[in-house]
Image: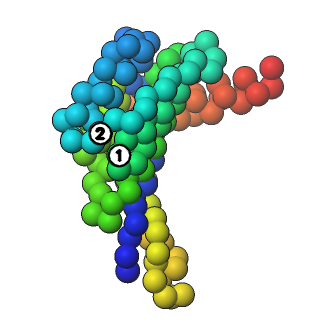
Amino acid sequence: MKILARLMTADLFNCKNSKLTDIDLIKETLRDTLADLQLKLIDLTTEKLDEDHYIFMVIFNEGHLTLHVYTQLKYVAMDIFLCQENAEPDKLAQCMRSFFKPDKTKTTVLKRGNFGTAKELKPKVKTKVAPLRRIHNTGAKVIRILAHRNHQ
């Protein structure tokens, strides 16, 4: 089975709020992290989508990373796509977790590409939930706040 790429999604709950609001520091951390992992930055874009919702799109030589940062919720949704058969998206994810310092992290990793025969076409999905510190229903709070916004 040949794997063309790996995709990791991560939900970072109850992050340190002071770091969530420092857009320049987040951009600097993204640049430094790519340099440390020897990934060549092609483009880094930041958009303010709402009063407390920022998106960071990072394109680099071997893939891309997106961050949706919800400052009031202290929540970050992260997607990492690496275009390598033996890619290790967790190295990049670990740097981001160290920066945002979430109380709880939920990650899912998908193998992307040619899965071979029809029998092998169903990809294996590995989901890992790792509580780092005590958390009080942050996921439920995120859902309630987002549902409330949609009804406004």
Residue type indicated by callout 1: Asn
Quote the CA–CA distance across marks 1 and 2. Answer: 5 Å
Residue 146 percent coordinates (x, y)? 66, 28
Which of the image's four quarters has the C terminus? Answer: top right
- Whether residues under marks 1 and 2 lie with C-beta atoms below 8 angstroms apart, the answer is yes
Residue 83 in view of the camera: yes
Relative vertical location of residue 142 with respect to residue 64 in this rendering, above or below? above
The residue at which mark 2 appears reads as 40
Residue 121 percent coordinates (x, y)? 52, 79
SS for dot 1 = loop
Crowd tier of the residue under label 1, counting other residues whose Cα lies within 10 Å: few below 14, some 14–19, many 20 or above: some
The residue at which mark 1 appears reads as 61
Q: Name which residue lies at 27% across and 36% down.
A: 34
Q: Name which residue lies at 21% across and 41% down.
A: 37
Relative vertical location of residue 58 with respect to residue 126 in this rendering, above or below? above
Tell me where residue 149 sits by quadrant.
top right
- The residue closer to the viewer here, 66 or 9, is 66
Tell me where residue 130 sits by quadrant.
top left
